[in-house]
Image (cartoon, helix red, strand yellow):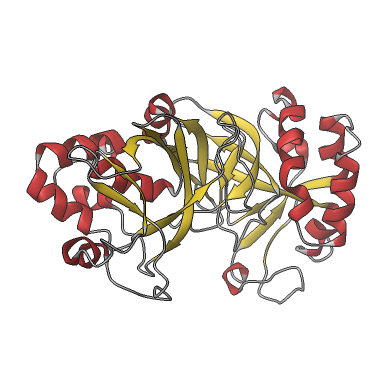
């Protein structure tokens, strides 16, 4: 194995963020737990989005994947694991598809609107606080639905997609439709900065509970995050399928991760070694992104939908490492003379 810090341009590398990251080419024997994984499950998820990967090498591999090869042999024969930016431990968090209670019409109970993207929003626009305090969006027909909990709506925006169980019957699924151009700021980190909690105490459930116990200070806390997410309605013809990710296709619980596409190609297989409580050694597929997911060693694990998935995802904040599996020639191009 060789480690290089590369500062040169390749046609393969499309973003300057890669320029000063170390790159290490590994073997499959270097991946902890590789042999014990369900490679067939990973291959099935890979096939869901591989047709959207750019490049003749990816196109060829997608064609092979469609022939239903032996899954482990397929990955070992055509890919090489690449560790990018591995000097510091990775950070793994979890996300899920929230399920909110709502209605198509506003009532005394359902009074918090889920908005579509306004046509005038291009680039940086009003902050979260300005949007909510000015009520600039109300009465314009931009409401997809109304929900009964402003805190759950805030976390719906953080997750970027979810489903709303309608009081009239049925569901409406919403996906990411755009944002107001402000950078995401963590309210959990803000609670730590204020001395309310220690870092290891913070989770989505802890934040929700604190905001509900402290409604005035809680509203101020949520306004600490100026980013505001708008939604679009997504077809929910099959409620058993996961929400659409960044590749505009359904994602899969425990096999999809959100990554930073500046470092990891969307659609690529990624081997993760998550430590901490409930360690995970699994081949995932990079099919989603997120505003808080930044860096080569950063991933968000999709846990599914509903309260149980939310409880599991909300406590994940663990170290480890992650390796992207690249087509062999593409992997070797990253390291001279490898």
In the displayed structure, 17 sits above or below 277; it is below
x 28%, y 33%: residue: 205
Q: Nearer the viewer, residue 79 or 219?
A: 219
Q: Nearer the viewer, residue 173 or 78?
A: 173
Q: What is the number of callouts on the image?
A: 0
Looking at the picture, how far across and down is residue 46, in whole percent? 73, 41
In the displayed structure, 183 sits above or below 196; it is below
x 67%, y 57%: residue: 265
On-image quarter of the C terminus: bottom right
Q: Nearer the viewer, residue 252 or 1?
A: 252
Looking at the picture, how far across and down is residue 117, in whole percent? 41, 63
x 37%, y 28%: residue: 311
Task: Tell me if residue 318 can be seen.
Answer: no
Looking at the picture, how far across and down is residue 331, in whole percent? 78, 56
x 14%, y 43%: residue: 196
Looking at the picture, how far across and down is residue 325, in whole percent? 73, 47
Quadrant in the picture for residue 198: top left
In the displayed structure, 6 sits above or below 281; it is below
């Amino acid at each position: 194995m060789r480690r290089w810090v590369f500062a040169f341009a390749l046609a393969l590398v499309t973003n300057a963020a890669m320029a000063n990251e170390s790159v290490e080419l590994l073997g499959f024997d270097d991946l902890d737990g590789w042999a014990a994984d369900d490679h067939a499950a990973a291959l099935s998820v890979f096939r869901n989005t591989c047709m959207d990967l750019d490049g003749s090498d990816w196109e060829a591999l997608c064609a092979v994947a469609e022939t239903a090869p032996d899954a482990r042999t397929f990955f070992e024969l055509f890919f090489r694991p690449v560790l990018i930016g591995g000097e510091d431990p990775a950070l793994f968090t979890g996300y899920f598809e929230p399920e909110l209670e709502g209605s198509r019409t506003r009532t005394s109970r359902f009074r918090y609107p889920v908005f579509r993207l306004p046509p005038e929003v291009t680039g940086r626009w009003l902050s979260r606080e300005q949007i909510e305090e000015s009520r600039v969006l109300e009465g314009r027909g931009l409401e997809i639905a109304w929900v009964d909990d402003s805190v759950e709506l805030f976390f719906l925006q953080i997750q970027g997609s979810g489903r709303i169980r309608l009081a009239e019957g049925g569901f409406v699924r919403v996906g990411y439709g755009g944002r107001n151009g402000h950078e995401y700021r963590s309210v959990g980190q803000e609670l730590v900065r204020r001395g309310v909690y220690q870092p290891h105490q913070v989770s989505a459930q802890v934040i929700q509970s604190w905001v509900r116990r402290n409604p005035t200070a809680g509203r101020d806390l949520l306004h600490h995050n100026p980013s505001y997410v708008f939604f679009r309605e997504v077809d929910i013809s099959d409620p058993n399928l996961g929400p659409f990710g960044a590749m505009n296709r359904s994602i899969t619980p425990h096999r999809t991760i959100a990554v930073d596409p500046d470092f990891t190609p969307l659609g690529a297989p990624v081997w993760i070694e998550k430590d901490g409580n409930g360690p995970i050694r699994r081949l995932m597929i990079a099919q989603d992104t997120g505003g808080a997911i930044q860096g080569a060693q950063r991933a968000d694990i999709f846990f599914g939908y509903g309260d149980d998935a939310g409880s599991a995802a909300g406590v994940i904040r663990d170290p480890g490492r992650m390796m992207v599996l690249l087509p062999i020639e593409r992997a070797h191009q990253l390291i001279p003379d490898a």
